[in-house]
Amino acid sequence: MARLRADCPWDQKQSNHSLIPYAIEEAYELAEAVQTDDDEDIKGELGDVLLQVIFHCQLYAEQGRFDIDEVITTLQQKLIRRHPHVFEAENLEDEAAVKVRWDEIKAEEQAERSARGKPRRRLDVTKAGSALMQAQEVQKQASKLGFDWDGVSGALDKLDEEVAELKNELKERISTDADNRNRAQVTEVQQTHIKEIEKDREIEKNREIEKELGDCMFALVNVARKLNLDAEAATLTCVHKFKSRFGYIEAQLEAVGKRLEDSNVTEMDALWEAAKQHE
């Protein structure tokens, strides 16, 4: 990893934040490999997950914060601390007793963390997971504390509100793009300066659109929760449905000697409708 950081342009550009999507992706791919039960796939995906750990440790080591040895030592200490019935003299007779002791130890760890200025807030009980899973869980926990609508109508109204805000943000983007196209008469130097300013504005505008889109997604998850549906499962169902229908389009095109790249959206849309009839 140190060699890659020194000699590979892509690895040199990475940061701990830029690696987050890859760590999540590799964890999902490992889960899929375990489901398929193929040894070669499992070994490969375990290696990819391990690479993410090594990569992060390398970056933190370069920052002078800690290295992989310290990470492993911290893990060893945690395992020993949380298993006194194995590594110490405590006698815990069954799984229920182990669970009780485990919770006590985690509470002690949290007290120590709070003493370091990191108190645990009520929504911190939400476990890490996909964005949809976390969204639904934090809403569930907030609801337990009384922060919720009585029924689904309030959640639907909020969804409409967030979609309207996203549309307004997108309208501003379209209006700005039109203004930019009307600046054709300025000098080349002015054009260069304008482009630099517009690049910064584009980045900021994308951030605003991302926020509004996130609000829409969060509101939609709330609707799912109020209907006692799992937003993650609903989305995965849609993903699998999309892949199946698109696979049908590809197969039908292949049957007449065509590739997807040789088709057009009108033809593919007609095949999409046919795919829906075959479900």
Image: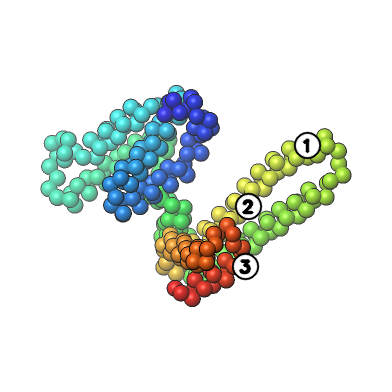
N-terminal of the two: label 1 or label 2? Answer: 1
User: In the rendered view of the protein, which quadrant contains the C terminus?
Assistant: bottom left
| Disc number placed over residue 192 in the picture, else none | 1
In the rendered image, is residue 249 in sight? no
Q: Is mark 2 on a helix, strand or loop?
A: helix
Q: Which residue is drawn at 64% across and 58% down?
A: 166
Left or right, 257 with reference to 113: right
Q: Name the residue under label 3.
A: 266
Label 3 to label 1: alpha-carbon separation: 39 Å
Tag 1: amino acid = Thr
Quadrant of the rendered structure where residue 49 is?
top left
- Which circle marks residue 209 in the picture? 2
**What whole-number distance in Å separates the C-alpha atoms at marks 2 and 3?**
29 Å
Q: What element carries label 1?
A: helix
Residue lying at 70% horizontally and 43% vertically, measured from the top left: 201
Q: Which one is nearer the viewer's eye here, 113 or 192? A: 192
For image coordinates 49% across by 73% down, the residue present is 276
User: Camera-side residue: 156 or 198?
Assistant: 198
Residue 262 in view in this figure: yes
Three-letter residue code for mark 3: Thr
Q: Which residue is drawn at 67% across and 48% down?
A: 205
Q: In this view, does 146 lie to the left or right of 73?
A: right
Q: Is residue 183 left or right of residue 177?
A: right
Kindly report the distance in space between the C-alpha atoms of the residues bearing marks 1 and 2: 25 Å
Kind of residue indicated by mark 2: Ile
Circle 1 packing at 10 Å, graded few (<14), some (14-19), many (20+), is few
Image: 138 above or below 113: below
